[in-house]
Image (cartoon, rainbow, N blue to C red):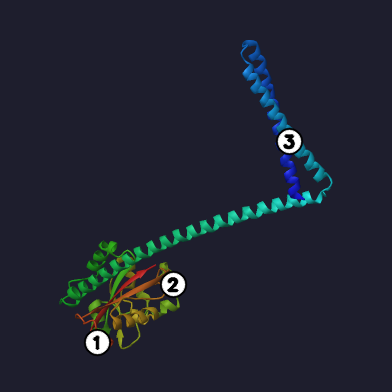
Amino acid sequence: MSLLHVVGFGLKVGHLLLMLCCWIVSVISMNWFINGGIMDTKSGMFCDSGKMWLKLWEKILGNSCMIHHHYYQYVGSKRVPKTWWKKLLMTWVVGWLIVSLSIFWYMRLQATEKRKETLQSMCDERARMLQDQFNVSMNHIQAMSILISTFHHGKKPSAIDQRTFARYTERTAFERPLTSGVAYAVRVLHSERAQFEEQQGWTIKRMDTLEQNPVHKDDYAPEALEPSPIKEEYAPVIFAQDIISHVVSIDLLSGKEDRENILRARASGKGVLTAPFRLLKSNRLGVILTYAVYKRDLPSNATPPERIQATDGYVFLDRY
């Protein structure tokens, strides 16, 4: 039924347009013929042509009227309920709504995919940058370990002190873009503790009490810390960058996270990273990278006991 109404509406519009065009053409043709007869007596041929056009238009109008008459005879005998119009309107609205939602969903999916690709590209670029920065930092740490091994452990007396180390690390901070501070802890056996403390002028402090009971940075006082308990070996910090100079004299082997890091780093010969934990004094969440310093060059296939025996100390870098 809806198709018949659409066809009927189209025929009506077409019929009205056709009648309007015919009337306009007829008026123009009649005016032309009349003016032509007055102005030129040799217009017989044009008049005949005009008459032929008029007859043609009359046939066209007659046929259109017959089509229109037959359409109304067919449709008029079948009354279409008004509910069909409502259904047609609802169908049209729902159909366009579905099309609009489909287009919106498609464009949304395209935008989401584009954002995913952009985000993935940014992440890949950031990962490459971090990898490059990490490689630069590791190269600098290895160079620093060689420097300490050569000018501290290889010289008697040492050619490096706290002031020299702090100045050097401060001026080369650009080569360690992923770190906030750097420090060096030496390996001290229990049999060497008394002599070591006498040379340094301070007592090896314990770290675990600060981990269990963190204090505010304004209340932090290294001299008030308890001495490290007696054990087989220690790892007190002797050099530190100024920003973390508060860790000097603290035994890192007495801390849970740092102890595990030290044991893994010296046995593997590689840089080892801790899990995030609260750093001393600042109480900020950070990580520590540990790299072992050896007394001599070790072969790549050296066993863990050989590496432990050849260990001189540990370079620490923190990041928060």
Callout in the foreground (2, 3): 3
Residue neighbourhood size for the residue with mark 1, other residues' Cα within 10 Å, grouped as few (<14), some (14–19), many (≥20): few
Name the residue nearer the viewer: 211 or 204: 211
Q: CA distance from mark 1 to mark 2?
A: 39 Å
Cβ–Cβ under 8 Å for marks 3 and 1: no
Sequence-wise first label, 3 or 1: 3
Which amino acid lies under the numbered mark 3 shown in the image of this protein?
Asn
Quickly name the residue at label 2: 215
Q: Is residue 44 left or right of residue 76?
A: left
Q: Is residue 315 visible?
A: yes
The label shown at residue 306 is 1
Label 3 secondary element? helix
The x, y position of residue 247, in whole percent, is 33, 73
Residue 205 visible within the image = no
Rendered location of residue 104, percent (x, y)? 59, 54
239 left or right, relative to 1? left
In the depicted structure, whether residue 25 falls above or below residue 151 = above
Residue depicted at 30% across the width and 86% down the height: 233
Element type at mark 2: loop
Across and down, in percent, residue 259 comes to: 36, 81
Residue at 73% of width from left, 40% of height from top?
11
Judge left or right: residue 62 versus residue 108: right
Helix, strand or loop at mark 1: helix
Residue at 66 percent across and 17 percent down: it is 33
The residue singled out by tag 3 in the image is 63
Identity of the residue drawn at 70% across and 37% down: 14
State the separation of the CA atoms marked 3 and 1: 111 Å
- In the image, what residue type sits under mark 1? Glu
Q: Residues within 10 Å of mark 3 (few under 14, many from 20)?
A: few
- Where's residue 51, x and y in %? 68, 23
Q: Earlier in the sequence, mark 2 or mark 3?
A: 3
Q: Is residue 140 above or below residue 257?
A: above
